[in-house]
Amino acid sequence: MANSKKQSPNKSLQKEHLHRKSSIQDTLSAQVNTFFSTIFSSKKCVKSHVVIGLSGGLDSSVLLHLLANLRQTLPFQLSAHHVHHGLSAHADAWADFCEKSCDALNIPLTISKVKVDINSGLGVEASARQARYAVLLANDADYICTAHHQDDQAETLLLQLARGAGVKGLSGMAAIDDARKLLRPLLSISRVELEAYAQQHQLSWVDDDSNANTQFDRNFMRHSVLPILMQQYPAIKQTLARTAQHLADANDLLNVLAAQDAQADLTQKLGEKTLALAPLKQLDLNRINNVLRWWLAKNNVLMPSAAQLQQITQQLLHAKSDAAIKIQLKTEGDLTIRRYQDYAYLVAETPSLAIDYVWQGEAALSFANQTQLTFEKKLGEGLSLKYLDSKILRIKTRSGGEHIKPDSNRPSRSLKTVMQQAAIPPWQRSQLPLIFVGETLAMIPNIAVETSLKAATDEMGLVVTWQQL
């Protein structure tokens, strides 16, 4: 009996330990189940396709296991994608580990090798992240899922504070990023909980040796800053994550105000993203800057510094009306802000377009500057098909001296005049493909049709549209 009594506390501790482990599993599984159940219930398709970004580390290995089990209760297609950066001597081994992990769970895996531009000026961390997201977000899937957790959110907030970020930057990562179809179901889960789950299920994972290098900003926050803060504030990670959520809520309100201040006048002119400047001239500086940040964010542009935002505001709203505004943005690709006729334009610099092509009846033609012509037959619109019978339809870019007569009651006008009247910005004019019948300029896509070749209301016509890809 005495021996039995001595063992009772141990048994009690064992039961408590097992209960705690079971509780962790139940909590994680339940939270992930609820997260995806809510998302899938709002989607019309019968079976969603979810792609998980799999590095092979602890976080993504736990998420892979959770999602593999979730397939038993929720109808969705699951696959994984590993991005091979080639920055570590162990990169091949990590890819092999991911392949074995997915094979064991019967999950399809894609492995993509990328070349990280370490000289981009963004730093190795940011360049690798940029390359990774470019590959992951290119997946043809309903959702892309990453394993960012509560600790990552806390580190992100501290990093953004150190960089002097505004409300949007301080709001951290979103659990649901609709614009990019990006999901982060573990944002409310701590790394400690993930470790406990992995141990309970005897999961294996790989450790990236670079995670210990405190020369990288995130690692410095993780290993040098947060441990000190936790000595005084044990719940600092949860607190920071909660603060990020408060700031995300505030950012949502700022976005609502920006949309109202911009008078929801976001348009596309031949594919380029524009913002009307007239409504901004009635606002104070803080609200102007809020609209500009909102506009850039809606177009997935990296947020400019405070100094650059001041420069953008000054040039867009106060430079002379005939000034040629061209502001280079520090972002992926060659992107500039330009101004024309009281509109701001986001312009992706593309190769000069030189076309001389005979149309072969294609429904669409794509060009090197990421634009496309589409051809569609419509009653009473476009070029009359009877005039096109046995005629060669040629597509050419501007060479100079072209004229067109879009109105039977007015004389023909130069191409330059027509484009000016249609508010086509100067940088687009040489890029716009023109439609010729013989030597006659028959159509300026989206703008004008030669009156002598127009389809009558009872005739079938050919409508040609120019658009951004």
Image: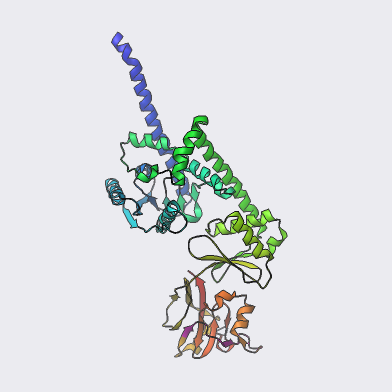
Residue 350 counted in the magenta span: no
Residue 169 appears at what percent x and percent y? 55, 49
Q: Is residue 71 visible?
A: no
Overall secondary structure of the magenta stretch?
loop
Q: Residue at x 64, y 56 (%)?
A: 289
Q: Nearer the viewer, residue 74 or 171?
A: 171
Q: Position of residue 417 (x, y in %)?
A: 63, 82
Image coordinates of residue 152 in percent, x first then y, are 46, 43
**Residue 297 left/right relative to 195:** right
Q: Quadrant of the N terminus?
A: top left
Magenta stretch encompasses residue 406: yes
In this view, the residue farthest toward the right is: 282
Q: How many marks?
A: 0
The quarter holding residue 23 reads top left
207 in relation to 398, above or below = above
Magenta segment boundaries in residue numbering: 394-409
Q: Residue at x 70, y 62 (%)?
A: 281
Rendered residue at 60%/79% (across/down): 419
For residue 76, say whether it is visible.
Answer: yes
Q: Position of residue 134 (x, y in %)?
A: 42, 58
- Decide which of 281, 105 is in the foreground and name it: 281
Residue found at x 29% / y 52%? 92
Display colour scheme: rainbow
Q: Nearer the viewer, residue 241 or 331?
A: 331
**Residue 421 position by quadrant:** bottom right
